[in-house]
């Protein structure tokens, strides 16, 4: 995140923001799970499959690489929004 204009150092400012995060799935003990959005999981699996095919089934690697790229492009389209955004500072006071 970039702030413009850059806040000067003569005053203290507070940046308040909200974000949404996807709930993580449960994991088995000593297991690992990539922390990626759920719509990238298919792309992750196909990418891993194509890389493993280079070692274990080189004759299938080209077809799996194409499938991985197709899945990656689909995930990129799902994970983006084509909307306008306006961020405006709140100039009201905050008192407790």
Image: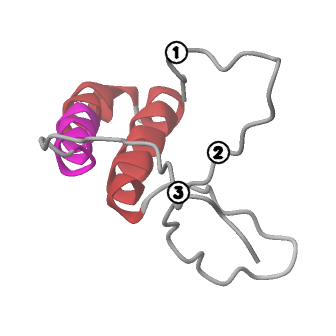
The tag on residue 92 is 3
Q: Are marks 3 and 2 in contact (CB under 8 Å)?
A: no
Task: Say the numbered circle drawn on residue 5.
Answer: 1
Query: Where residue 15 is drawn, which disc sits there?
Result: 2
Helix, strand or loop at disc 2?
loop
**Residue 85 location (% of width, % of height):** 24, 42
Quick check: is 72 in the magenta stretch? yes
Q: Position of residue 56 (x, y in %)?
A: 50, 37
**Residue 84 at x, y = what percent?**
15, 40
Q: Quadrant of the N terminus?
A: top right
Q: Callout 3: 10 Å neighbours few (<14), some, many (20+)?
A: few
Q: Residue at x 87, y 71 (%)?
A: 30
Q: CA distance from mark 1 to mark 2?
A: 13 Å
Counting residues from the N terminus, which is met first, the one under dot 3 or under dot 1?
A: 1
Residue 2, image x, y percentages: 54, 22
Q: Name the N-terminal-most of marks 1 and 2.
A: 1
Relative depth, front residue between 71 and 37: 37
Residue at (42% x, 44% y) in the render: 49
**Helix or strand or loop: what does disc 3 sit on?**
loop
Q: Which residues are magenta?
A: 68-80
Whether residue 77 sits left or right of residue 54 in the image: it is left
Q: Give the overall secondary structure of the magenta segment.
A: helix
């Amino acid at each position: 995140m970039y702030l413009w204009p850059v806040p000067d150092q003569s005053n203290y400012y507070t940046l308040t923001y909200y974000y949404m995060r996807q709930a993580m799935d449960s994991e088995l003990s000593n297991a690992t799970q990539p922390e990626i959005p759920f719509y990238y999981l298919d792309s992750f699996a196909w990418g891993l499959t194509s890389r493993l095919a280079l070692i274990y089934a080189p004759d299938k690697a080209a077809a799996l690489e194409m499938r991985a790229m197709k899945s990656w492009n689909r995930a990129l389209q799902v994970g983006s929004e084509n909307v306008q955004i306006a961020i405006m500072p709140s100039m009201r006071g905050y008192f407790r």
